[in-house]
């Protein structure tokens, strides 16, 4: 498994905002990383899906819901348009040195801003199982979580837009840390 901290984007000098949110629509942590000092844009090309997900003045909204087996990264371009929603299936999440983190289970779901849906890294998940880096239960949980997310957000993208817009707006009003 890979551990990933919320504030580790681009290894650059980014502006980072974090907030614990407990309200009627979300319980967990939301973090906003404002990307600065990019050496070169990060262009992704998977299964015919070509997009720039990281460049100067882009923003990444990291969402860590309580008691879930996924985390969401929402990538915004320099005009604050959503480029994509990137869901990591996770074994667990927590806080390390006051920063949220995930233990990533490799399997990912991408919903493009244009609505395109892609499942990524199934081979990495299978390889992790074969290496005994994860258990059979972890493997099955990753796929169960993937199906849950497809049912919840792929079918009803408006709920996803509402959630991410609300969290983004809450963080835009916070001071950076």
Image: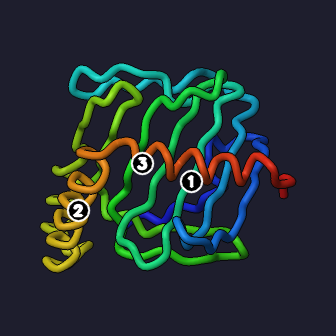
Write the residue at 22% across / 75% down: 138
Q: Is residue 124 above or below residue 11?
A: below
Disc number lying in front (3 or 1): 3
The residue at which mark 1 appears reads as 62
Q: Is residue 148 left or right of residue 163?
A: left
Q: Give the Cα separation between the discs numbered 3 and 1.
A: 14 Å
Task: Say which label, 3 or 2, has the lower sequence index.
Answer: 2
Q: Which quadrant holds the C terminus?
A: bottom right
Q: Where does the image place residue 22, in percent across and percent down from the top left? A: 62, 74
Write the residue at 60% across / 58% down: 6
Q: Where does the image place residue 126, in percent across and percent down from the top left? A: 14, 59
Q: Is residue 24 left or right of residue 145?
A: right
Quarter assignment of residue 90: bottom left
Q: Residue furthest front?
A: 24
Q: Where does the image place residue 55, in percent across and percent down from the top left? A: 62, 25
Secondary element under disc 3, as helix, strand or loop, is helix
Which class describes the residues within 10 Å of circle 1: few (<14), some (14-19), or many (20+)? Answer: many
Quarter assignment of residue 31: bottom right
CB contact under 8 Å: marks 2 and 1: no
Q: Is residue 144 above or below residue 147?
A: below
Q: Give the Cα separation between the discs numbered 2 and 1.
A: 19 Å
Which class describes the residues within 10 Å of circle 3: few (<14), some (14-19), or many (20+)? Answer: some
Write the residue at 64% across / 47% down: 168
Task: Say which label, 2 or 1, has the lower sequence index.
Answer: 1
Secondary element under disc 2, as helix, strand or loop, is helix
Q: Which mark is residue 82?
A: none
Q: Which mark is residue 160?
A: 3
Q: Give the Cα separation between the discs numbered 3 and 2.
A: 13 Å
Disc number lying in front (2 or 1): 2
Q: Is residue 167 above or below residue 25?
A: above
Q: Is residue 16 left or right of residue 55?
A: right
Q: Which mark is residue 148?
A: 2
């Amino acid at each position: 498994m890979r551990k990933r901290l919320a504030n580790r984007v681009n290894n650059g000098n980014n502006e980072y905002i974090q907030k614990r949110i407990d309200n009627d629509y979300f319980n967990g942590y939301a973090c906003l990383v404002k990307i600065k000092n990019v050496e070169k844009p990060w262009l992704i090309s998977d299964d015919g899906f070509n997009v720039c997900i990281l460049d100067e003045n882009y923003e990444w909204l990291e969402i860590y819901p309580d008691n879930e087996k996924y985390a969401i990264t929402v990538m915004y371009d320099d005009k604050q348009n959503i480029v994509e929603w990137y869901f990591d299936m996770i074994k667990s999440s927590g806080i390390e040195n006051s920063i949220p983190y995930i233990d990533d289970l490799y399997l990912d779901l991408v919903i493009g801003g244009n609505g395109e849906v892609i499942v990524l890294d199934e081979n990495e998940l299978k390889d992790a199982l074969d290496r005994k880096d994860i258990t059979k239960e972890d493997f099955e949980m990753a796929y169960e979580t993937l199906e849950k997310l497809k049912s919840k957000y792929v079918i009803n993208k408006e709920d996803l837009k509402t959630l991410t817009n609300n969290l983004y707006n809450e963080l835009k009003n916070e001071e950076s840390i």
